Amino acid sequence: MKLSIIIPTFNEEEYLPKLLESIKSQDFTDYEIIVADAQSNDNTREIAKEHGCIVVEGGLPGLGRNRGAKIAQGEILVFLDSDLELTENYLNDVIKEFESEDLGIAITQMTPLSESKRDIYIHDLANWFMIAVENIKPHGAGCYGIITKKELHDEVQGFDENLSFGEDTDYIERVAEISQFKVLRNAKIGVSTRRLEEEGLYTLLKQYGKSTVNDFRGKRTSAEDLGYEFGHDPIEALDSVEMEKIAEKSGNINLKDKINKFKDKNHKANELIEYTEENTGIIKKEALGFEGERKKIFYSVCGEGMGHAIRSSVILEHLTKKYDVYIFSSDRSYKFLSRKFDNVFEIGGFNTVYENNVVRTKKTFFKALKANPTNLKEGYTVLYKECRKIKPNIIISDFENYAGILSKLMNIPLISLDNIHMITQCEYDYPPNHRTDMLTAKAVTKSYILRPKRHIITTFFYPPLKHPKMTALYPPVLREEIMKLEPGEGNHVLVYQTAESSINLMEELKKLDYKFIVYGFNKDELDENLTYRAFNEDQIYEDMRTAKAIIVNGGFTMISEAIYLKKPIYSTPAHKNFEQILNGFYVEKLGFGEYHDNLDVKKIEKFLNNLETYQENLNKVKAWDNTEILKDLDLSIEKYSRLDY
């Protein structure tokens, strides 16, 4: 026999006939139907027998499914909830896709037995979520239909009868560990909306949202935690006589105790000894059994540009000396960091779309929307699976958004370390005509990193903090190579621009009586007073060290290093990039140079004629190093690390 269809029931006389009729209407006929009934006191058993079903004693759903599977003759088991209805050709579609892809465990997608647009949208969203996470976390429930091989069911010893809720997801996860899991794309099953109608959308979202988050964290949720009702009647409604009947016939004399026993025996109390380090205000935690162990850190880095990677490489050089650090990034940042460190993993990422030095917000949005399913499956899969395996004590993010999601999903403390959160955490001035850009940037920044334990922000300007207790400002993180440089003054101006945005400017610069060394065109060439250079890290250090001034966009790293080397700055931020606009604005506000919306040769000439003024202001800037920011980070790691695995 090909299929055994197993249905756990309790008082399902209203819904069971519809399911059985939908099974009988299928073209596929090589099946048996087994109903595992938990001592229903209505006509459920009679209905099952009238439809030719095999009836066995059930109990809670996990027990009932196991009872049915024990006598099943089919090669493939299909577990269905009693309030489902099969759509046309459901069984044929299931068998075809399940066998053609050599799957071991699968679920199907849902379609509501309702014409409500709200219900359709909710179930479509649930289907999308299941597909999005299928490679990350095999997940599902009886309402999706569960399909597996009988031999695999026997190998994992069936459903865990000790679980009062989530036994179906636990089962799927265990079978998926030894076989291939998939959300089937062709078959859809009709799902009753009775719980939605009886309990309301808010209650169900709260219940299943909590159980899903706990499941991703590796924590089981009990029926009591959710106020969940088996068979749509409270468990307590099963009187003692009924409970004894179920227990006696199932051979499980402790069933009632198991139903009411919701505490996790394996939960270990996190016994912490706290003490305050003198003069720091930082609480350090030491858990029993953890003393002397190296903490494990996930460090996730935004892949756009090179600024995040350059800063992170300095931080990581420090952290890897005392912690076990696992690094996650994308694009150029991944390539850069993987050459310098071990344990570097590639994940998906988002990049801003620029055209002629202008941020194209709509194109950026649609590009991200298009890439998100792939990024979520491929990138987040890596983060999630490594997290479950390694169990990090803390996550640090340099403006990488998947780390923020992982932090909340897995309940792992998060530290944000970047320059971008200046936008949300400080009260700053900005050009009034860029208010729309500011609001857009603030919304995006808030969505990237969700409520970290601490914000550590690097900056060259110091506006008031909105939340001083959880936020700190420190000077920019500097590479050792930059700090070793002795500033000198040559006879050239360093230009760092992209060819696309400034090709016309190059011809205009030939009219000025200055020598320009130009990066960004990826070529080595001499053109009158313009010396083009392909990127070379050692060479650009020397050219920056001896420059009279620099002409750059609004990138934080280049501006910070120019300030450290006391080089006047002509800044032309990318249009609509508020982070760059803010950097350029404060360059001018602090008297370190000028900020302009466009590259203009007349304005550049005026800037170059006023270098002495900017140089005086820059000479007042005290040199700094990375000591204080690294100290704060170390203390924050000790304070916030999770130690209760």
Image (cartoon, rainbow, N blue to C red):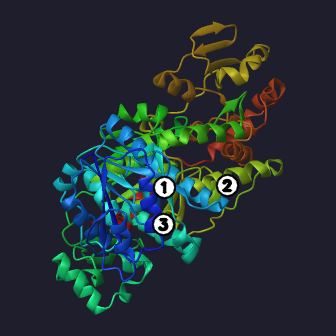
Residue 420 appears left or right of 511: left
- Name the residue rendered at 69%, 62% in the picture: 427
Circles 3, 1 touching at the beta carbon (< 8 Å): no
Label 3 sits on what residue type? Gly
Q: Quadrant of residue 598?
A: top right
- Name the residue rendered at 20%, 73% in the picture: 288
- The answer for how far apart the CA atoms under marks 3 and 2 are is 27 Å
What kind of element bears circle 3?
helix
What kind of element bears circle 2?
helix
* Residue 55 position in % (x across, y down): 27, 68
- Name the residue rendered at 28%, 71% in the picture: 163
Q: Quadrant of the C terminus?
A: bottom left
Q: Quadrant of residue 567?
A: top right
**Count of numbered circles in the view:** 3
Work out whether mark 2 precedes mark 1 in sequence or the reverse, and give the earlier one: 1
Work out whether mark 3 precedes mark 2 in sequence or the reverse, and give the earlier one: 3
- Name the residue rendered at 52%, 67% in the picture: 470
* Circle number at residue 209: 3
Crowding near the residue tagged with mark 3, few <14, some 14–19, many ≥20 C-alpha atoms within 10 Å: few
Label 2 sits on what residue type? Lys
Residue on which disc 2 sits = 442
- The answer for how far apart the CA atoms under marks 3 and 1 are is 18 Å
In this view, the mark in front (3 or 1): 3
Residue 7 appears left or right of 57: right
- The answer for how far apart the CA atoms under marks 2 and 1 are is 16 Å
Circles 2, 1 touching at the beta carbon (< 8 Å): no
Residue on which disc 1 sits = 404
In this view, the mark in front (2 or 1): 1
Crowding near the residue tagged with mark 1, few <14, some 14–19, many ≥20 C-alpha atoms within 10 Å: many
Residue 271 appears left or right of 473: left
Q: Is residue 83 visible?
A: no
